[in-house]
Image (cartoon, rainbow, N blue to C red):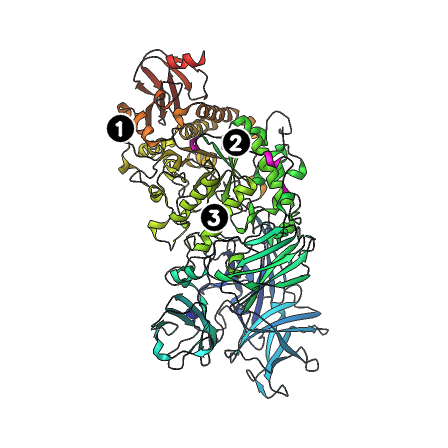
Amino acid sequence: MRKIKKIWAMILMITFIFTLVQIQAETVKATEKNDEVYVKIRYDRLDKNYRDWDIWAWEKGKDGEAVNFIGEDNEGKFAVIKANKDQKQLFFIIRKSNWSEKATEDQAVDLTSGDKEVIIHENNKKINREDKNLNKNFNKIKLNLHYYRSDNNYDSWDVWSWFNENDGNEYEFNKEDEFGKIAEIDKLNPNGNKEISFIIRKGKDKWAEKDIDKDRSINLAYANNNGEINAYIAEGDEKVYMDNSKPIGKRISSLKIDSIDEINFEVSSKITNTDEFILKENENVTGEDLYKIKLENNGLKGCIKFNKKLDLKSTYSLEIPKYGVKNAEFRKVYGSKEFEDLYSYDGELGAIYDKGNTQFKLWAPTATNAKVIFYGKNGELYSSEAEKQLDMVKTNNGVWTVKESGDLDGVYYNYLVTVNGKQNEVTDPYAKAVGVNGNRGMIVNLETTNPLDWENDKRPELKNPTDAVIYEMHIRDFSIDPNSGVNLEYRGKFKGVWQKDTTNLEGNIKTGVAHLKELGVNTVQLLPSFDYGSVDESRLDMPQFNWGYDPKNYNVPEGSYSSNPYDGKMRIKEFKEMINELHKQGIKVVMDVVYNHTYTTGSSNFDLAVPNYYYRQDAEGNHSNGSGCENETASDRSMVRKFILDSVKYWVEEYHIDGFRFDLMANHDIDTMKLIRDELDKIDSSILIYGEGWAGGSCALPNEEQSLKINVPKFGDKQIGVFSDDIRDGLKGDVFNNTAPAFINGEPGFEDWVKFGIVGSTKHDDIDYNKVKYSKKPWANEPYQTINYVSCHDNLTLWDRLKTVNPNKNDEELKDMNKMTAAVVFTSQGIPFIQAGEEFARTKVNEDGTFNENSYNSPDDVNKLDWNRIEKYEDLYNYYKGLINLRSSHKAFRMTKAIDIENNLKFLQSVNNKDNLIAYTINGKAVGDEWKNIVVIFNSNKESIDITLPSDNWTIVVNKDKAGIESLGKIEGNKVTIEGNTSYVLVDTASYEKNYK
């Protein structure tokens, strides 16, 4: 999703202008020529989430290049491209920087008539384009001029800036950021000038010296709608840069401690020797006999190797003449034993509330200063200045602490953390309550957030993990449509999940929690419902949607699902209320948790407090991309592991959560997952744990340590489940090829994939593992380590997949295939899982009529549950309901031990080599079922097939049309004809009648 910024040292600074036809998005020449055209391209997204988006631009016959957005205002993000009028047209695409998504197709801009502004509006996923003349008419301009000097000495330097010769003024460098110093230049522009000019100068008389002895100007095309411009200047460099993501000036761009005896450095332009390097420890020059420097051939990188261990409590710096001075930052050394021994901490962290006082504890071992700041109790004042601040004291293990007396319940707070020379405002990673958009923590007396009967809330009992029937749902999807029957103010909210006795508008279909009860599911899995960053909680009057895989504050419910996101307590109260009410209905709640990555990296709570610690690095020191989001948390580091453990325990103990689905679980190391299981067992061993046994990209953690599907045997007999992509793709086809057929389409060769799922991915002599493409051997030790499913929020819905693979089949034929898919899942050993709406042919259709396979931010019209489909697909819905009843009523379909499956589930050898046919028997009596003998048959051929049964006299409980535990007919002998695209479940008549007369 996100492209990690290329290291500045990998790109040489451009020192001359190549050609007039080259696109120039980052630099501004001193004068504007008649043949130059400025094009401002705006992108106005509904969700205001511009992460990873940029522009690909090109002129005819020329190579394209990426252009970053350089500003933002009320009309969205914008970039400015300086082109050449002679080229006549400029072309662009707005896209994700890795081409994973495009907002537009090729767009052309006419250059012949001068400067242009193009606005790309997103309106309910429809793109509208607006063209207009580029506005350069500003009565007032604010220029933020960012200035970098390699020696970090800005004494006596300032800026002289003007529009006209008679309105020049001097401006001090009065602020700073990571780039350098900043001069804020506010100037009136009564004459409507189109450029603002400046000189950087020095001396007591302010003109003793100039940094570049010439006037430089910036075109007002670069201003946002408020007349504000950010520009970047480097010492000795004539160019004015509008985008600081590229290397600017000679500098030490990186100095990282990567092991206990190595510091790696990078520079922005080539160095030929290291003779003038000066290395210091705590401002004292380090003797050259204590280290060696190895410079790489490109002169842009190198390694300082010490002949003794570094003192991790010391400050190391490198000075290179003309490149400046830089302090070393921790990076891969975070994973060293020395760091862990020095800074690991096992105590409580966060705001520890008591009515008489609150103690604050923040783990920030690399910080040089920390404060806690208070904002008062009014959450509506989310942009107000702090009212008070307290200095914190650094204690052992890198923990900063301070105690404030009084009852601080409801007070909003943050930390100010100084690290690597910069002060960051940090929302407490351990915050238990937050304000709007999660930008401020809130101290909370959690007792005041409990529902009236919270102390009596109990987890619904399931004797075994395989008793669970999991229903995956999204809070907003579940009730946002009017035909949900949910009160308008509750739609899309926590309250909308549990509103009682809801029906569709006609009153003939149960919806919401009433539907769940009628269907028979006993466990819901909520898509991310912790506080995530991709929905603006202050703009809920605007259409916004996201699945929520963008973690911001892990220990707080999402504010957009509450009735008031400005009130830090409201989301907590309403989340607990939802849990309580679902529990009353006998429904467990599993949280979808996303500890594998964060919404942002550099600006995440983690990185602002302890830069680089929480994220795993690859061999080059770059962020590992096992999450596919270009940041991946390092669960193998002690304080990341501690955070995850503390977090899951907090959700269980404070919110009574019944289980966790771990997103991209392979990014977590095996030891961490085993510890999570052990810790939760101490609280309640019935708490479910399962996750995706794969990563979203290349993970730097060694394969043998990842919680991959193939590594499940390393969990022993612990209940840590993994989704079975074997049965998923064996049934419906490869999810990465939407038209690929499989078993339910009558495609031969997938029988053993499905049979492997039927035995819960455990060892079974009747499976030919050479025919199971993804898994050449069993990977589950016990059936409760397997999650059997065919659809979830990812990829096409099952119904849309069936229609895509089988475009010429009618609804009746598609329903038959859907029913068989469900029959396989619900009669298989393991834990069954369905996507919300699968039971009534859920579809996700874009405005253009295409099916949506990745609706993570699509509008409600695409994602909502259309409850009226239950009426249209009533027979499919009843089939699901009957299958769930069948499974819940009979232990034979939910065995708890692999040995029981091996001994009592046997595939009929008479059909073993027949295409698209699977048949097996279950010895129900041996596993404590009322039904002594059971036969299950799946025929996905078009034609009927005759099968010889192991004995005479059977009762049908599942056939092509119906499913459940009621008799659908008898078979007197030992022969049965199975229609095409049909599932059968048979019970020996003697034991059936004994228990159902």
Q: Amino acid at mark 3?
A: Leu
Q: What's the magenta bit mostly, secondary-structure-wise?
A: loop
Residue tagged 1: 913
Query: Residue 659 versus residue 287: which sits nearer the camera?
Result: 287
Residue 942 x %, y %: 36, 26
Check disc 3 and report its element: helix, strand or loop: helix
Horizontal arrangement in the rendering, residue 754 relative to residue 460 (left or right) = left
Bin the neighbour count of mark 3 within 10 Å (Cα to Cα): few under 14, some 14-19, many 20 and up. Answer: some
Q: Which residues are magenta?
A: 449-466
Residue 221 x %, y %: 61, 68
Residue 460's label in the rendered image is 2
Asked if one can make out residue 334 in the rendered structure from this viewpoint, the answer is: no
Q: Amino acid at mark 2?
A: Pro
Query: How far apart are the two marked residues, 1 and 3, measured between alpha carbons?
Result: 48 Å
Bin the neighbour count of mark 2 within 10 Å (Cα to Cα): few under 14, some 14-19, many 20 and up. Answer: some
The C terminus is located in which quarter? top left
Q: Earlier in the sequence, mark 2 or mark 1?
A: 2
The correct choice, above or below, for 159 with respect to 667 in the image is: below
Query: Residue 375 versus residue 616: which sits nearer the camera?
Result: 375
Residue 973 is one of the magenta-drawn residues: no
Query: How far apart are the two marked residues, 3 and 2, measured between alpha carbons?
Result: 23 Å
Residue tagged 3: 645
Question: Quadrant of residue 10 in the image?
Answer: bottom left
Horizontal arrangement in the rendering, residue 771 relative to residue 437 (left or right) = left
Q: Earlier in the sequence, mark 1 or mark 3?
A: 3
Check disc 1 and report its element: helix, strand or loop: loop
Residue 867 x %, y %: 57, 31
Check disc 2 and report its element: helix, strand or loop: loop
Q: Earlier in the sequence, mark 3 or mark 2?
A: 2
Horizontal arrangement in the rendering, residue 387 relative to residue 687 (left or right) = right
Query: Residue 142 versus residue 19: which sits nearer the camera?
Result: 142
